[in-house]
Image (tube, rainbow, N blue to C red):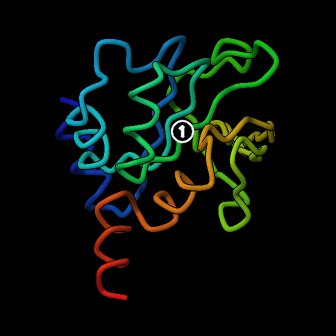
Amino acid sequence: MAIYDAAMKYQGDGVPLVIVGGKEYGTGSSRDWAAKGTNLLGVKAVLVESFERIHRSNLVGMGVLPLQFKNGDTRKTYNLDGTERFDIGGLSNLKPLGEVQVTITRANGQSETITVQCRIDTAGELDYYKNGGVLHYVLRSLAA
């Protein structure tokens, strides 16, 4: 199935998406449209080894949660193959550069909880994220 078709199916089913990636995620995609596309596909979080600086910021600006593996861990450390379900805890208590608990549930029902780093780096970015992105933040500020 094409990525777009799969994303639309998941959106129709009310299933938010998580992208799992490697090093320097977003390199070559630092333009804001790359993050807009991610958001429009229904992606709510990106969990990677590291981010390209501007793309990470653009993800936050689009309301997508950037998460990073800790201690040199990678998707391979946890044998992730794309069949897992991810539950991200503590979203109401996010702090810039804080830790987040992610529960990974495998297709066989086994689960494990790992600690990752939230890559919302500043209090201002946290405000943007909590409002669903920069546009929503600005609109709410103007309405107030």
Percent x, y of residue 35: 30, 37
Q: How many marks?
A: 1
- In the structure shown, which secondary structural element does the residue marked by tag 1 occupy? strand
Q: From the viewer's perspective, is 43 left or right of 51?
A: left
Q: Is residue 60 above or below residue 26?
A: below
What residue sits 63% from the left and 18% below the top? Answer: 75
What residue sits 50% from the left and 27% below the top? Answer: 82
Which amino acid type is shown beneath numbered disc 1?
A: Pro
Q: Is residue 130 above or below residue 4?
A: below
What residue sits 41% from the left and 54% below the top? Answer: 63
Quarter-of-image position of residue 25: top left
What residue sits 20% from the left and 36% below the top? Answer: 33
**Nearest to the observer: residue 102 or residue 26:** 26
Quarter-of-image position of residue 1: top left
**Nearest to the observer: residue 108 or residue 133:** 133
Q: Which residue is mark 1?
A: 66
**Nearest to the observer: residue 79 or residue 119:** 119
> Around disc 1, counting alpha carbons within 10 Å, would you say few (fewer than 14), some (14 to 19), or many (20 or more)?
many
